[in-house]
Image (cartoon, helix red, strand yellow):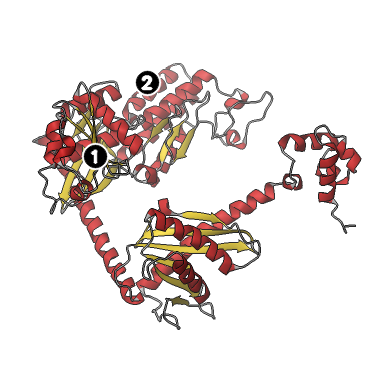
Amino acid sequence: MFSAEMIKGAADGPGVYLMREASGEVLYVGKAVSLRKRLSSYTRIDRAGAGKTAAMLARVARVDTMLTRTEKEALILEAGLIKQHRPRYNVILRDDKNYPSIKVTVNEEWPRLLMTRRVNRDGARYFGPYASPAAMWETIRLLNTLFPLRRCKSKQFRLGQRACLNYQMGRCPAPCIGAITPEQYRERVSRVLTILEGRKRDLIRELEGAMRAAAAALRFEEAAALRDQVRALGQTLEKQVVLSREAADRDVFGFVRREGRVAVALLLIREGALADKREFFLDQPLGDDPEVLAELLRRFYGPAERQIPPSILLPFVPDGVTALAEWLSEKRGGPVRLPVPQRGDKRALVELAGDNAAQALAEQASRHQQEERLAGMIAAALGLVRPPQRLECLDISNLGGREAVGSLISFRVGEKEPARYRRFKIRTKDTPDDYAMMREVLLRHLGRSREEGTLPDLLLLDGGKGQLGVAQAVAGELGLAEDHPALASIAKDRGGTGERIFIPGRKNPLNLPAHSPVLLLFMRLRDEAHRYGITFHRKLRGQQQLLSDLDRIPGIGPARKEALFKALGSLAGVNAATPAQLAAVPGVGPELAAAIHAHFHPPGSS
């Protein structure tokens, strides 16, 4: 437990502190202008009413400190340590992995335009993430229409190759056949980047100038094409909601805290128009509002590919605002202001962002209440001691026992938790024995969950009383508590038109109405587990189908397979070859030749 003894001798200067538990795991990383004052403030926290902060302090076994020369250095060091340790009590923004981004592969000789959900440090330019996938696809369609780039994955073009169908349809400039010069292609890429950076008006002015020049030079076809591009860009600008009379780029933050929960809304304004909106939810974040806002700004603008506007409007002054402004300016390569407007249009923008944050928090609270009611209904229907919060469902998928897999999905009441999804390749059974397969997967999953302390509140099995019995037996073997996890199974009735729910200690299935929210949720869990398993199962079967018979022979690798095909022409030639012919192939030899021949001509075959 955190105590004043841990911080004796803390320096009165800027730096970073790491709170660790007994195992050495980092619980929290923080920065301070004065380490002594900041750490001393934790000794004055009311442990009874501090919620998440008290829970963390109860686990702290030691505190490490690192001095820096300036507050800005402390901020940069803190960001690096958080990225390295990913402490559970720091603000970690997780929205980016759920939303798609647009990627322009400027690191390639002939860049492409792609959709991606993963941002890598590969030299490409990333834009987003887009809270609305529909808006992202609309942007991609616009760019593919106005300034299409190549769509093929080829890293290098071959001499004499033919252009693909996209070129014939006007959807690709075909650099592969030299239909566009490198200079023209780079200009096209530049225009794509200009649009993605939100500078459509700049591009319109550039295109209008080019259009007038083409018309003056009597290049009327080129001028008409430029006119159409200007019109299309103008139409997209008309669709955007204009929030500012200034055609400026700025981000606007709204911040609301209620009953320990924080909601933040971010309005991304480009050229005075609303380009996108983001929402973040923090459950009992550590620190007061200025500290939380400062940490959120550091987390959001930390990634190297993040676009930073010259002005970021805030509802109040964040902690360490001077160091933050210096850090952001350095990352942007130009000055960044962090004003807190008090009147006028800018103040109205901050209030609008605050209204969005309040609405988002209210909607989340409503969803939370609905989830709590559903959890209570599950507990009542199954006779559980407490409402379950985390639910898992396990399904076994196989084709005649071959390529059998177990698929496990996880829900937080009614919401998916994809990060907790798991797939299991069955190791011990090649025959269609569902009970043995279920037992193997349950032993592996529940055993590991027990060690890691991640057991679900309710485990649902796809199957009937037999599968439920297997789960009960495994729980007993592992010494799990009778009600943790609670167990249930779901199966189609004999007519195949309804569903039956089985629970331990009850001979007959539960009689749940067809419209019961509990039954509908269980069906959703079962269907999601089935979908997840079938997807993996198909992938495994596809991989097996891609293997030739030679890949299944021990001792045959890519080099020997290539040598066999080169010497004998094909798989049919290998099949028809005699042991002597096989042994004559470089790298094979008599012993391996005999194994290959025996594989294709097993004893008893004609």
Residue 303: percent from the left, percent from the top? 34, 32
In front here: 181 or 334?
334
Residue at point 40% right, 81% down?
Answer: 511
In front here: 50 or 400?
50
Q: Which mark sits nearer the N-terminus, 2 or 1?
A: 1
The C terminus is located in which quarter? bottom right
Asked whether the beta carbons under mark 2 and mark 1 sit within 8 Å of each other, the answer is no
Q: How many marks?
A: 2
The residue pinned by badge 1 equals 62
The residue pinned by badge 2 equals 209
Crowding at mark 2 (Cα within 10 Å: few <14, some 14-19, many 20+): few
Residue 559: percent from the left, percent from the top? 74, 34
In front here: 465 or 333?
465
Crowding at mark 1 (Cα within 10 Å: few <14, some 14-19, many 20+): some
Residue at point 9% right, 43% down?
Answer: 44
Q: Is residue 155 left or right of residue 476?
A: right
Q: Is residue 449 left or right of residue 306?
A: right
Residue at point 53% right, 25% down?
Answer: 110
- Residue 302 figure quarter: top left
* The disc label shown at residue 40, or none: none
Q: Amino acid at mark 2?
A: Gly
- Residue 6 figure quarter: top left
Residue 496: percent from the left, percent from the top? 53, 77
Circle 2: element type: helix
Question: Can you see residue 603?
Answer: yes
Q: Amino acid at mark 1?
A: Arg
Looking at this rendering, what residue extends furthest in the top direction?
217
